[in-house]
Amino acid sequence: MKRTIQSIRITTNTINTFSSQTTTNINQQQQQQPKQPQPKQQQQQNHHQQPPHYQQQQQQYYQQQYYQHQQNYQHQQNYQQQQYYQQQQNYQQHQNYQQQQPYYQQQQQQQQYYQQQQHQHGEPSFRRPSTNRFPEPSKTNKFENSNINTNNQPNTNNHQLLKKRKDEEKKLRRIGVLPSHIKPKPKSNEIIISKLAQEKKQRKLLLESSKNHNTTKNNLTSKRELAIPSAITVAQLAQLTHQKLYRLQSLMQSAGLLDTRPDRILSTDDTAYLVLESGYEPIVNDTLAYDIYPDGPSVDRSRLVLRPPVVCIMGHVDHGKTTLLDALRKSAVAASEAGGITQHIGAFEVSLKDLMAAGSANADADPAGEGPQTITFLDTPGHAAFSAMRSRGAMTTDVAVLVVAADDGVKPQTKEVIDLVRQTDIGVVVAITKCDKPGIDLHRTRAGIYDAGIEVEGLGGEVPCVEVSAVSGKGLAELAETILAVAEVRDLRAEEEGVRFEGRVIESDVERGHGNMASVITLRGRLEVGLDIIAGRSYGRVRQLITVSGEPVSEVSPGRPVRVTGWKSLPEAGSLVLGVESEEQAKRACENRVRRFEELGLAEQIELVNERRAQAREAFETGKAELEGMTRRERVAHLRERNQQASAQAKIDSRNEEDSPDCLKLVLKADYTGTVEAVRTAIEGLGNHQVKVKIVSSGVGNISESDARMAIASGAQLVGFNVKIDPMAFSPIESHKVKYTIESVIYRLVDSVTQDLVKLLPKRYKERVIGEAKILQIFEINSSSSSSSKIKSKVAGCKVSNGEIKKSCSIIILRNKEIIWKGQIKDLKQGKKETSQIAKGQEFGISFKESDHPVPSTTNNVSEPISNSNSNNGKNEEGSGGNVQGISGQTFDRFEVNDEILAIEDVLLERTLNDGL
């Protein structure tokens, strides 16, 4: 500190002296020049003409003098540094000598001890006794003081501890891990250089400050910025930060990162922390961190106004949700639904006047109060494939109406809805439909709802339960009043002015003439035409607002549904919609969201790679532990066996890849983003270990020509849900014979895809007995294949006792219920005429092919002979009973009279996706 203050004083003195010298020189030059009187006007002109040239020369002269002074100052500093280096070296040598003194003293004491022992007991033998009477000198670290026992005997504990630590260090170095407590100590030269480097930085800082440069680049107290990639290994980070690997590993251990393997891939957050701890500043870009967020809740209650409640109709499929909503809003939406089931989230507005008069005889009923005059209803699908839609409906709604059919009770989708309601803070109203059917036990239905987790009124709960009938109108007025009461208790309010717009995407699709459209429920603020908005990874500017009745409006208040056009890309269902000040801000935020989404996928891949590498490392350590304690020959044998097992496993894996399940490739198109998600989930769940579904691409809108081209290139089928095929797409579809399926009901689409999957399953056959005969007589005839008449061949004369005998079928010959031969028919004649089949009760002659077949040793999959109850029409009928047992190793020798003949035919079995599961 004193040295730095002195250097500052020297620089200030030199600058002062230099300025004084320059002023004296200028004064002397002015004195030497002869003075001539000039008029005042001339002096003013010269004053305006001479300064530029004169000032430039003066500035150059000052700079040259300043640079010369800086060089002299630098030479002086270098000389002082050399002197300082010499002093540090001398001091370090003195410290080393002081540290080594105890070691030399210990050696002298040990030598004196040996001389005393030798003088008393004579020359000690080279083999020391077990009592360790004459131990070796302790090889302790020369930088550590070693103690001597009171008995003047050397201490061996330090020697054993040092040896143990060295062995541990060798083992850990062998596996690539070196803990922090075994770090090698830095050399004395490294300490000196590091201290000198710090002092050099301080001097440089003082020098820069003396120049009065007000820039932050030369501020050496701040850390240097370091650009880091999104994925980097530990070894690469050590190189990037210019430090030893073991230092970075010890830093990771202190940070709680126990996996310090050099090949581990670090995440972005871990990399930034390690770079920060290593003395660098990770680059933080405000542009990349920019995003749009919703405003916080309003503290001023005067800004909050009552908004229409959002009521969601939820329940199991075919429990009457849409029919109930039709009765409330006096429409017929259920009749127009494909297949009679809801397959989208439908948003409707119902006036309170119509709602109150729905089940009342007074048509002029007017709702009381000065609140909102409408209620927004969401009709969610109840099919199992639309689980995500129900979740979005529960996330957006204020009051949920749980619809349960009295004749069906609680079903799986009902339980799913109950779980969603219990997870969210929304009001619940239970509506038991179809209560006017005969033989309905309403108490049992209420008990089932209570057991499922909804504590309804009448059974000790507080959840209101209303019995309704959409056909007769029973209970509709009571249900309307209950919905209004629950909404009034919740006191639903929102800001209309002075807040960023906020909404939720219910559905999105591509509509001809409008482009990308999204059904949005407004939650806060006003949605106006021309407002820039962002939803998820999509943004745009509101071009048109269309109400559920089809009328265009200029703005929408909170709590109302609306169709929004003007999106740059199709937003995802369930995304949060936010208003933005400008399109540029929306674009920046959208780009950052896309980047973060890609980084999230990269992080998942990094975790997967780290997991695989950890498994490989564990397997390596396990194999290494197995080799410890083995001789060289045992190791060679063990490694040879391991290689053989690995090669065998590789062959098995290659066969498994060849036997991998066949894929049914599909190109999927649907009308809404929500239905695309639902259909994709339903279809991808089909298949088994033999066949499976692979979605090549999916999207919203009609099947276009590009979709047809993609299906042709990938060998896929076209699947459409509630869409059509563009006229331009028919030409490539027909020319390449691409199969396509268009359905408007989801379960029909699933059935169609299931049938296509079943066709890919391998064929399975079963042997079935179609006919029985008995050998009555054996004839010997001349062989037709030989010119000599002496060679005879046997022909069996038989009679069909059951079923029929076909020439194309296989034959089994039984003797005493045991198989003696199995093969094919050579000739089948009725009289002298060749025939293809013989009916029941007819006689025939039969000969068999010469190539005999061995009889299998296991039980044959052959049904028992046909029973005598078969009719004479010759139909193939199976009898009941067990299988026929065969004799191992027998072949056809000869057939005899009274042997039985069975005609066997392969029958294709019906296949399903449950086969083999």
Image (tube, rainbow, N blue to C red):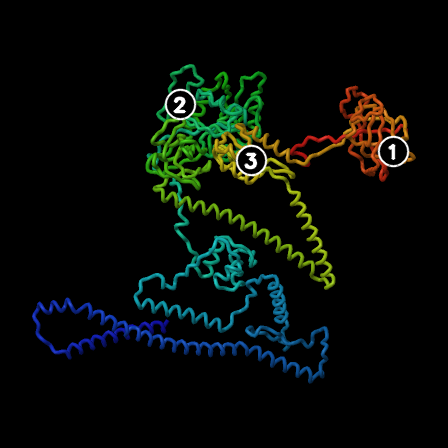
The quarter holding residue 511 reads top left
Front residue of this view, candidates 198 and 823:
823
Could you tell which of marks 1 and 3 lies nearer the N-terminus? 3
Mark 1 and mark 3: span between their CA atoms? 55 Å
**Residue 682 seen:** no
661 sits left or right of 537 in the view? right
Residue 286, relative to residue 221: is it above or below?
above
Q: Residue furthest bottom?
A: 119
**Labels 2 and 3: the sequence-earlier one:** 2
Amino acid type of disc 1?
Ser
Residue 736 circle label? 3
- Which structural element holds mark 2? helix
| Quadrant of image for the C terminus | top right
Identity of the amino acid at label 2? Leu
SS class of the residue under badge 1?
Answer: loop
* 156 relative position to 246: left or right: right
Q: Nearer the viewer, residue 381 or 819?
A: 819
The amino acid type of the residue labelled 3 equals: His
Q: Residue at point 46% right, 59% down? A: 277
Q: Position of residue 768 (x, y in %)?
A: 76, 29
Sequence-wise first label, 2 or 1: 2
Q: Which residue is mark 1?
A: 783
Identify the residue position indicated by label 2 in the image.
352
In the image, is residue 632 above or below residue 874? Answer: below
Q: Position of residue 626 (x, y in %)?
A: 69, 58
Name the one closer to the observer, 667 or 64.
667
Q: Position of residue 469 (x, y in %)?
A: 51, 19
Q: Residue furthest right?
A: 790
Is residue 374 in view? yes
Label 2–label 3 contact, CB within 8 A: no
Which class describes the residues within 10 Å of circle 1: few (<14), some (14-19), or many (20+)?
some
